[in-house]
Every structure is written in structure tokens, then in C-alpha cells.
Image: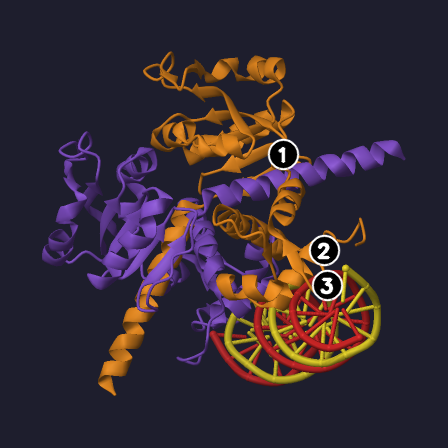
Chain colours: A purple, B orange, C red, D yellow
Amino acid sequence: MSENRRISIAVIKRLPRYYRYLGELLENDITRISSKELSIRMGVTASQIRQDLNNFGGFGQQGYGYNVEYLYEEIAKILGINNTYKVIIVGVGNLGQALANYIKFEQRGFILKGLFDVNPRLIGMTIRGIEVRDIDEMESFIKENEIDVAYLTLPKTRVRKVAEDLTKWGIKGLWNFSPVDIEVSPDVIVEDVHLSDSLMTLSYKINRRMLRKEAESKK
Amino acid sequence: MSENRRISIAVIKRLPRYYRYLGELLENDITRISSKELSIRMGVTASQIRQDLNNFGGFGQQGYGYNVEYLYEEIAKILGINNTYKVIIVGVGNLGQALANYIKFEQRGFILKGLFDVNPRLIGMTIRGIEVRDIDEMESFIKENEIDVAYLTLPKTRVRKVAEDLTKWGIKGLWNFSPVDIEVSPDVIVEDVHLSDSLMTLSYKINRRMLRKEAESKK
DNA sequence: TAGATTGTTAATCGATTAACAATC
DNA sequence: TAGATTGTTAATCGATTAACAATC
């Protein structure tokens, strides 16, 4: 493997899925797997699996396949989920509260440290023992607690300003749930979850399916 | 345009983003836009925009560009968000509740009709005037109310069974938030929101950024 | 009309799949 | 050793970009 190979985003997006399937294999006490067998389970080509993995190193063994536990751990390392990240949530509405309660993210290394909102009715409330603070306190909080990542679950009108501030204050990553594209310095990683976009894709596909059926029934 | 051209998933996934940008243009009273100008705003090529749109029809005019409002409406039609879909949410935990409260989805045509859970403590509760029902009542409810779509926000151990049932009962689309891949008949559309996968992608990118910085500082 | 910009064909680029020598 | 399966190169396929004639 070459240390400096440019890894395409398509490959990166597939890694969590490999990780998920390997986790399931582990749960079922399966200790080894070939790219062929895994490809059948996942509905992809064996070639793609081998190509993808070999971007990061040779984790398999000729004639044997892959050791499930070893590969699982290696992918964890690649994904960086052995690290921990200190997290704040900005915007403690419905979605912010839901994410705050979702403990599975902690298992991926994302440790919730603070909650922020502008709404006086929310400020002072606690979720999982963490107090909701006024957004004015955010700068000092980030610096004192060395916050790495912010989940952005606030109204879209305020997102750009907040993202700008967070960038200034040294945030490393933003998990953005607002339906806007954030433009910040390339030093800050932005990962978007555009729920509305996802729903529109669903709408498109349902619609197309219905149109197809109509067309067929006319034949 | 050819009615039966196979549209790639990449194109479809870009449509909501076009729709979003056109909406912003409308808000700013911009009535016309060229592919060139839009490409600059969106950070893509003008060629890609024209190619994408021409999968569905010629919406522009030589020498003029595109009429923003017209194109906006046409994309809405393509996405099928002028239709309405009757929705239930299965699993009224944190995320299910958050989605139930999110009225923006209604604007996209997804009308919430029912909430279902197995937890006796949740059953009977109401959100936005909609009662949480026992999951045992789901079959009759779907048939009586002609439900089109289910949001799946229940624990992953139960998702596969529920998806199977819903398929049997004639659901058209599933918006799946569980970290599992659902396999149902091709008549049912599944759109996944894998939050955990998204978070791992964020982790990967932050990690890579840090490794790069380290490497640079050693030079 | 002249200038602008589309719709569309052709060229390029990148990602996926196939093939197979290396090797466990 | 013989069989299995990887890692990797080569071939194919599809998506993106460039170019330009058509036309408003």
C-alpha cells in the first residue's frame, strides 16, 4: 500500500458498512471470511471488497481469506473510532435532544460534553446529566474543555454564523443537520446529514415506481 | 429527453440540492439563472448541471438560461413532492419523537397519520395531536388509512421483522434509521439514514486531517 | 442581428469489474 | 503438495467534463 494514495470518497463511505457487517459476523462467532463470501452477503463484488481494503493495506491471507476480528479492528483504526472526540450539541430542539440521548455515538468515541441553545426555557435543563448552557458561553466552554466536534441541530438561519464562530474557536469537525451547505476553512471537516434531501430521494423513487406501474398496466 | 432513460443514483441524489439552491434564489427574488452562474454558487461544473437537468427535459432557453421559478417547480414535480404521502412512525423513542415534531417534512408532502410503539408507557401519549398506538394495531391502521410510508426508528433487533410485515401490508416506502440493511421486495423503496455511518465518516476525515498535520509538522 | 447560453455529442477521467500470478 | 484465495494489474464501464452547433 502507498501511504499517500488519494482515497476516493466512495471508498470511505463504504467502510462503515464493512465495519457493520464484520461486527455482525463477530456476533455470530464467525472467525474467518473470504471476499467472495462477504460479497454475497453484502451484495457487492468480491473485487470491490479487495480493492477497497487494499487501499489501506493487505489485511488478508492467500488461501485463507480474512480474519474477521483482525479486519474489524483494522477498519476501526482506519475510521479513527478508537480515538475519542469531545462533542457539543448546538441547538437543543427535538433533534438535538434525540442525539444527546443517543448513547451509541459514545461507543464510536464521540463523548458529549456540552449542550447549547439560545432559548431561555431550555437553558438550565439537563440531559443525561449535562446542562444546557447559553450559547454566549460557548466560546469559553470550547476552549476550556478542548471540544473537537459540534453537532449542528439549530435553525438554518443561524447555522452559518455559528459555523463561522466555531471555526474561529478551533473546532475540528461539524456534523451538520441543517439544510444548508456550510463553507468553512478546509481545516474544519463538515459532514452533512440532509434529512430533507433524503426524504426527497425517497419521494422520487416512490413516484417513479408508481409511474412505472401505471405505464405497465396500460400495456 | 427519452422517457425510459435509466437515471443514475448520483443524478437523483443531486436533485434535492438543486432544489434547495433554487429555493434560495427564489427567496432572494432572482428570476433567472444560467448554468454557469449556478455552477459557481454550488461549486460544481455548469456542464454537470446541464447534463443532469437534461435527463428529465430541456428546461432552459438558449441565450437566456433558466427561469428560476419554473425550474424550481419542475424539479418539485420530478421529485414527486407535489404528491402527498401518508406516514406512520414505528418506534417513538427520541428519534421517532423528533421526526414526529419536524413539521418541515409535511411541506414535502409527508403527512404524519400515526405513531406506533411497543412500550406501554408511550402508548396513549400524543404528539402534535396524534396518539401513540400499540404496534399490534398497525396492520388494521395501515389498511384503513391507506398508509404509504413508514419511518423506522425502532431498535435494530426488531427492524427486519417490522419491515417484512409492512411489506406484506402494502407499504410503498421505508425511511430506515436503523443501522441494518433491509431486504424487502423490490416493490418497496427503502431509503437509509445511517447516522452512525455518517459519524464514522466524520471520524475518518478528522483523523486523516490530524495525521496529515502531524506528517507535515515533521518535515 | 450579435451575443449569450443552452442541449447534446465527443473526449476524458475515474471507479468498478475481471483476470491471474503470487502465495499461504 | 494441491486448492483456495489474496493482492494487483489490466480491461471495462459509467460518470464527468469539454466542446460546439443550434437557437433564443
**Location of the N terminus of chain A (image quadrant):** bottom left
Residues tagged 1 and 3 counted as in contact (Cβ below 8 A): no
Q: CA gap, disc 2 to disc 1?
A: 20 Å
| Position in image of residue D5 (x %, y %) | 56, 66
> Which one is earlier in the sequence, the residue at label 3 or at label 2?
2
Instruction: Depth check: give the residue in front, B6 or B199.
Output: B6
Count residues near mark 2 (Cα–Cα under 10 Å), then give few for <14, some for 14-19, many for 20+: some
Query: Which residue in the structure is indicated by mark 1?
Result: B82
Count residues near mark 1 (Cα–Cα under 10 Å), then give few for <14, some for 14-19, many for 20+: some
Query: Which residue in the structure is indicated by mark 3?
Result: B62
Amino acid marked by disc 3:
Gln
Marks 1 and 3 belong to one chain:
yes
The reply to whether residue A26 is visible in this rendering is no
Residue B180 higher or lower than B54, as above or below: above
- Residue B55, numbered circle: 2
Label 3 lies in what chain?
B
> Which one is earlier in the sequence, the residue at label 2 or at label 1?
2
Amino acid marked by disc 2:
Asn
Instruction: Depth check: give the residue in front, A57 or B29.
Output: B29
Q: Residue at x 47, y 72 (%)?
A: A55
